[in-house]
Amino acid sequence: MFRDEAFDAIHPLDAADHAADLTMDEETFRAFYERTATGVWAYLVRITGNRQAADDLLQETFYRFLRAGATHESEAHRRNSLYRIATNLARDAHRRNIVRPSLALGNSDMDRIAAGDETAGTETSADVNRALSRLKPRERAMLWLAYAEGASHPEIAHALGLNPASMKMLLFRARRKLASLLRGEK
Amino acid sequence: MMTYQECAFEDEVLAAALQSRWPERVPAELRKHVEACAICRDLAEVAGAVNAAREEMNAAIVVPDAGRIWWMTQLRVRREAIRTAGRPITAVHVVALGCAAGLAGACFGASSAWFQSALRWVSAFSLSTLWNSVGGTLVPSARTLVIEHGAMAGMIAMLLLVLPAAVYLAIGRD
């Protein structure tokens, strides 16, 4: 089933990436970083609601990832680990009050995220940003991983430390909520 | 209470939305189904909107250079390794210092007549007073043993308590 597949199906990798040795030397790391850094940064902005915090957490995420020195059985597995580290760091920063999320409705930071500081972004992306900012951080993280990163249910569960069996239900609820917000029903 | 519902077309709709094929480049039957199915409508709307927001966002994201991250990580890993390697050395230093202090104390105790007489006086006075008041029922040999070696046992016990604490503090400070 599509939802149980790894998200490589949506963001396919080059054959060379698949063949690459899965232990990390500098070259492998550079290639992996180029493929994943923007996605992780976008994810961190979504869950923290703070660009500065996302910058710091991105560096810390890759540092922890490299320091762990784990070998991964596949590219998807490696990417899952990275998102899990990012989630834990963001959660930890939020708990310790390092990140002050500005997640209120109409938050200008969120609005600027869509297309950078120079432009205002499209109306649609501003609507999505506003709607997303009204969800709980966990709901935002779930929806972002599922529909921006194309992650499967087990991958989302792994990244967020949730029970895979309850993922379908949780994602269904979050999706319903966001759909209502996008239609202006709430 | 929101009950979970599934639709057989979900995967197809999601694939179309994530591959930016929705709604123009999908079969007409699928479009017709989505119009009638609330689950697929929500899915198409949400997946399409989030994916579009991501694509727009990607164009503006500037992340640090991979080389810089690699270099900083290597530096931090090295610093941490040096610190970790230094911990046992610090512990050995503390233990050695404790041993040296103990040895110096023992030499002083053995060679100083003043210290020995003071120690005898303290042991005889404090412990015999204590045992005379509360230790009347104790076996006499045990009583003698405690009176004769009580001060030494006290010092050893103190050393055993203080030394691990000192080691812990030394390592903890690192």
Image (cartoon, helix red, strand yellow):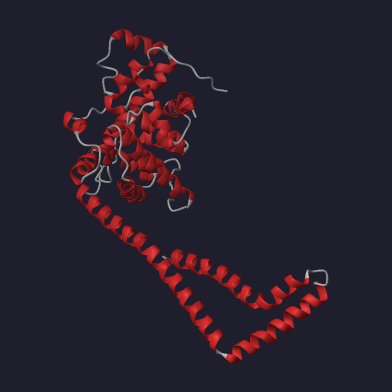
Residue at the spot 37% in from the left edge and 50% down from the top edge: A53
> B141 or A117: nearer the eye?
B141
Residue A173 appears in view: no
Q: Residue furthest front?
A: B141
Whether residue A77 is situated above or below residue B9 in the rendered picture: below
Residue A135 location (% of width, % of height): 46, 35
Whether residue A65 is situated above or below residue B10 in the rendered picture: below
Q: In the displayed structure, does residue A97 sit left or right of residue B67?
A: right
> B5 or A61: nearer the eye?
A61
Q: Residue furthest top?
A: B29
Residue B9 location (% of width, % of height): 37, 13
Residue A35 location (% of width, % of height): 23, 37
Which image quadrant for residue B43? Answer: top left
Residue A91 location (% of width, % of height): 45, 45
Number of marks drawn: 0
Task: Say which quadrant the N terminus of chain A sits in.
Answer: top left
> A185 or A45: nearer the eye?
A45
Residue at the spot 33% in from the left edge and 11% down from the top edge: B30
Residue A149 appears in view: yes
> A164 or B117: nearer the eye?
B117
